[in-house]
Amino acid sequence: MKVLEIQGITKQFGDFKAVDNIDFSIDEGKIFGLLGPNGAGKTTTIRMIMNIIAPDDGQILILGNQNEGIAIDNIGYLPEERGMYRKMKVKDVLLFLSALRSMDKKSATEQIDFWLDKVGLAEWKNKKVEELSKGMQQKIQFIGTVIHKPKLLILDEPFGGLDPINQNLIKDLMLELRDMGTTIIFSTHVMESAEKLCDEIFLINKGKKVLYGNLNDIKHSFGLQNIVIKYDGNGDFLKLSRNIKKCNNYGNTAEIQLEKDADAQELLREAIKECKIQKFEIVEPSLHEIFIESVSENNEEGEGNE
Amino acid sequence: MSKKVFAVIKREYWTRAKTKGFIIGTLIFPLMLVLIFGGIFIFSIFFQPSTKTYYVIDETNKIFDEFSTSLSDTLKNGSPKFNFVKMDILPDNMEEEIKSIQKEVVEKKIYGYMLIPKDILENRTVKYSAQNVSDFEEQHSLSRAISNVVKNIRLQNLGLDPQQVRDEMDKSWIRLVSSQITDKGEIEKSGTSSFILTYILTYVMFLMMMIYGGMVMRSVIEEKSQRITESIVSAIKPIELMFGKVMGICALGLTQLAVFGIMLSVIVTYGEKLFLKFGVTDTEFLNVIRQINFSPMIFLSFLFYFLMGFIFYSCVFAAIGAIVNSEDEGQQFTFPIIIPIILSYFIMFNVAKNPDTTMAFWASIFPFFTPIVMFGRIAVSDPVMPSGFILSIFTMIGFTALMFWLTAKIYRVGILMYGKKPSIKEAIKWIKYK
């Protein structure tokens, strides 16, 4: 079942097109990466999903329907800009947040105890938020996002400002929730964490789709362009070959990026003619590389058009 | 009303109702007022001065005896308040003697002296010199006592019996019993009491709108500056959040009013006994309060105009809170909002005296002024309803709804705008956003 379907949504602020005609859909129980540089349109997209702002065009289906009132209670949203009522007790903040998700007090209280215990903050229940460390507050915010057992969880930069231990804790919780069937939209510009967690990604830049699909498929399609060669002899051919777009030569090892339409086999044939090849490997690029590659390409195109 | 709005109302209400500031403000503040006034009274008992000695130089030789016996007040401990010593001084020695008296005053042997000149009947001036001349009450009683003696002398000079004249004058005081003519006939009503009622209630309205309106603004700013808003509006519509905020804080204001009201009625009911216990017999002011006719109509219209005025102005405060990024920025905007509130209070002062002028009518229809001015007119005219009363109910509801709708649009955009403070022009553009 599609948990979320986005069809051609567009949002313009004055002359600035924040989101330009994007489509994607998410299957149940997947971690979906909504990736892009700062200011790409991630938060605007999320705000439209959350019905905080209305799209100018297109539609959004949550759990197959548009009935925002019921649908919205099935979503948990951890915004990038997040804070809490500093003067309120932890318990009261969480009770308030769960009431906003239409939970009754009894089950909310149970869930609060369950989650506080789970993240090791049980004894802070009756403390005021301002007495907590920043890391603790982040954990409370996470609890506030998942307390109503949402079917769809939207996390905007959930690791921002967390130390490695707490990052790990949140990551484990994300995986645990996914295994329980929760669908997660993970929005970030940090590719390392997205690479480890996401099943599918949607890469957005300047409001437009850049890449969309299964992470392995994307990597696979990019992987054919990256090659590592270990050789003996004269490496000058690397400079001359018209198949090579970029080359990092370390003397006897070179990391090569092929031209878009180039064939790796052709390069291998060229190489064999010139020197002794010890290793010729087609490598999967990291998501980080894919990101930089796609975004800078996209930016150049954009500048060309202007 | 959705359960979510109720959750917001509950949060806004309880997080504030439980604070020390609110509890102190509500329970202890009126108590403190009582204590302060009681304290002033108690101090005035403990800090009674000792007997004051005055030298009196009576050049007429006619006044001293009657004057000194007429002032027989005693202090709490029973000793007399004044001790007057008659000084007979020959005119030739006057300067010298005065100097030596002055020396005695400086050395605090005596408190001061009075010089009653020969020509007092014509010039009506007495010289009063003392260590301290700030006790105007005492000076007043001294001058009244001398005046009385002078009055008697002058009456006698005309061949009249002073006592007889005094009795006649006492018998000629008249009292004006005021009544208001209504369609149900004439109703006896005290002008002072209805004025006091009107001023107190409109003042309460005025304060509440400013203090609690500011609270709405700070509540919005807290959520915005602490970056809480986005989590909240992902679960509830901004317009519902704003509504919940205004209502929660409004409920808080009503709570405070109710507590004050109960306290006041307790004071009015049991106050007299309490004051008597402290030795206060002058309970005239309680009578004034008791004469106030706090009719159900006044009560209902107070509630209505207070609620409308509060919502009307709170919406503006909420919009300002959404536009700015910090409380400091918010303060700059507060003043322009409270100007119409202050203005309406001043207008009410004039309107209360003449509630049926054309100007009074229009001022009470203008929505920024309606709550205070129209209520003021109702309170002074009660039980007759002033002109435009029905109209103002509809215009006020209409304009409040309009204000709510407009400010909710600004609010919705503003709460998620971080960074640079937008101009008012930009904020007004937000109204048009989809």
Image: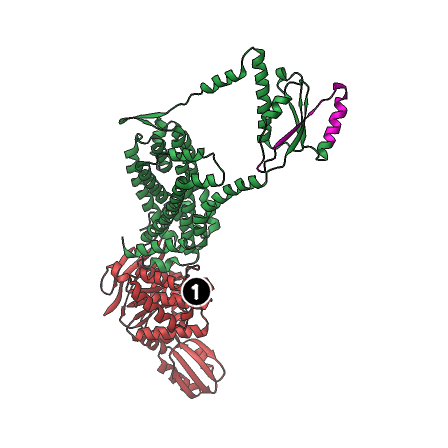
Chain colours: A red, B green
Direction front: furthest residue: B78
* Residue B95 part of the magenta-drawn span: yes
Q: Position of residue B339 (x, y in %)?
A: 44, 38
Q: Is residue B278 above or below residue B98?
A: below
Q: Is residue B11 above or below residue B130?
A: below
Of residues A256 and B226, which is closer to you in this image? B226
Q: Is residue B420 left or right of residue B356?
A: right
Dot 1: within a 10 Å radius of its alpha carbon, few (fewer than 14), some, or many (20 or more) residues?
some
Chain of the residue under the numbered disc 1 shown in the image: A
The mark total stands at 1
Tell me if I can see residue B237 in this picture.
yes
- Asked which quadrant contains residue B60, the reply is top right
Q: Is residue B69 above or below residue B106?
A: above
Tell me if I can see residue B430 in this picture.
no
Of residues B252 and B221, which is closer to you in this image? B252
| Residue range corresponding to the magenta coloring | B75-103
Of residues A159 and B196, which is closer to you in this image? B196
Of residues B425 and B409, which is closer to you in this image? B409
Q: Position of residue B83 (x, y in %)?
A: 64, 30
Q: Position of residue A77 (x, y in %)?
A: 34, 64
Q: The residue tagged with tag 1: helix, strand or loop?
A: loop
Name the residue that disc number 1 marks: A127
* Residue B255 part of the magenta-drawn span: no
Mark 1: amino acid = Lys
Q: Position of residue B342 (x, y in %)?
A: 43, 37
Q: Is residue A273 above or below residue B368?
A: below
- Asked which quadrant contains residue A144, the reply is bottom left
